[in-house]
Image (tube, rainbow, N blue to C red):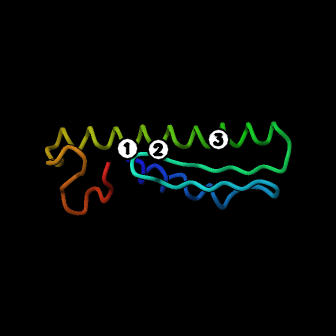
Amino acid sequence: MAKAIADAVYPDNYRTPTGLSAETRAEKTKVITKIECNESFPTFVATIDDLLSSVATAEKTLQETLKLCRRKGHVSNGQQCMRKNHCSQSF
């Protein structure tokens, strides 16, 4: 699931204002984000708030998708939808 979440917030790496940079990646089961801010502290806090909101939304969406796949019998190994062309992500 970490890779799917990191991929979901990856565009935020490029949509940062001047003086701010973010880099998000997955490492095994963890999502790692590095934020550098040369602006004010409130800008830094707002960036973290936006990022956490995006991560929470991505995680909830993936969890609900996995639940749906399980109910429909698409998940055979407990972690990945096995129905062809349905879900391309591992959870």
For the residues marked 3 and 1, what is the alpha-carbon distance in whole angstroms?
18 Å
| Identity, as a three-letter code, of the amino acid under mark 2 | Ala
| Identity, as a three-letter code, of the amino acid under mark 3 | Asp
For the residues marked 2 and 3, what is the alpha-carbon distance in whole angstroms?
12 Å
The residue beneath circle 3 is 50
Earlier-in-chain disc, 3 versus 1: 3
Seen at 64% across and 50% down, the residue is 34
Label placed on residue 58 = 2
| Identity, as a three-letter code, of the amino acid under mark 1 | Leu
Give the crowd class for mark 3: few <14, some 14-19, many >=20 residues within 10 Å. few
- The mark total stands at 3
Residue 41 position in % (x across, y down)? 82, 38
SS for tag 3?
helix
Q: Is residue 46 left or right of residue 6?
A: right
Quadrant of the image occupied by residue 54? top right
Label placed on residue 62 = 1
Q: Is residue 28 left or right of residue 15?
A: left
SS for tag 2?
helix
